[in-house]
């Protein structure tokens, strides 16, 4: 009797995870959740990471990126954070403006196009602005880890940040 082997190609979904800082080592619960998520998905999906590195902590960023590539991710794509002074005229709260980067937006668009990304997973409120770059190109999943986004000072809505004393949320 002859044994016939049939090879069936397995399609692996390609995901791109976007975060504001290298999540390794994990310094908070959100980063710990990201590491746990990657551990659970690494055998079924091919994820890459797109994140910022701090110019004054480049060695830490590169070390974390190497560990993640060796253990959990296909590739880590780093963009240097070059924060500008927050503008009161911006539609974004100051902490989100700290993550605004034309280079990050361009890198996201290029990766979607060149890497055949199937899904973009955006983590943390300050990175929500990049969902607009991927919208209409690939499915986008956004995860917020902290309900303090409901704070009027952290809101993306300018009218919420300009509230005067005595105003409150009606939930």
Image (cartoon, rainbow, N blue to C red):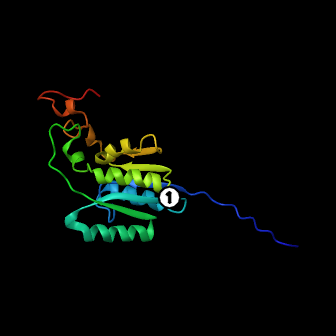
Q: Position of residue 87 (x, y in %)?
A: 15, 42
Q: Which residue is drawn at 55% across and 59% down?
A: 44
Count of marks overlaid on the render = 1
Identify which residue, 7 or 152, lies in the foreground: 7
Could you classify mark 1 by the number of other residues whose Cα lies within 10 Å: few (under 14), some (14-19), or many (20 or more)?
some
**Along the viewing direction, whichever of 4 and 39 lies nearer the viewer:** 4
Which residue in the rendered view is the most extreme toward the left?
A: 165
Q: The N terminus lies in which quarter of the figure?
A: bottom right
Q: In this view, does 100 lie above or below 156?
A: below
SS at circle 1: helix
Q: Is residue 133 left or right of residue 158?
A: right
Residue lying at the far right of the rendered structure:
1
Which quarter shows the C terminus?
top left
Q: Is residue 95 above or below residue 4?
A: above
Image spot of residue 36 (x, y percent): 42, 59
Q: Residue at x 82, y 71 (%)?
A: 3
Q: Which residue is drawn at 44% across and 56% down?
A: 37
Residue at image location 17% in from the left, 51% down from the top:
84
Q: Give the residue number, with chain letter if any, for mark 1.
A: 41
80 lies left or right of 136: left
Q: Position of residue 102 (x, y in %)?
A: 28, 50
| The quadrant where residue 65 appears | bottom left
């Amino acid at each position: 009797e002859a044994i016939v082997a049939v090879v069936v190609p397995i399609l692996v979904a390609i995901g791109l995870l976007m975060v504001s800082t290298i999540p390794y080592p994990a310094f908070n619960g959100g980063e710990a959740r990201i590491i746990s998520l990657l551990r659970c998905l690494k055998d079924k999906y091919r994820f890459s990471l797109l994140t910022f590195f701090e110019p004054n902590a480049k060695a830490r960023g590169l070390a974390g990126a190497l560990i993640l590539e060796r253990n959990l991710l296909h590739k880590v794509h780093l963009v240097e954070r070059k924060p500008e002074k927050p503008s009161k005229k911006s539609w974004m709260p100051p902490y989100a403006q700290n993550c605004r980067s034309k280079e990050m937006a361009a890198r996201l668009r290029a990766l979607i196009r060149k890497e055949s990304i199937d899904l973009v997973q955006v983590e943390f409120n300050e990175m929500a602005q990049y969902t607009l770059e991927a919208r209409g190109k690939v499915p986008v999943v956004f995860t917020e880890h902290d309900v303090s986004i409901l704070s009027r000072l952290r809101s993306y809505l300018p009218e919420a940040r300009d509230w005067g004393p005595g105003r409150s949320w009606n939930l």
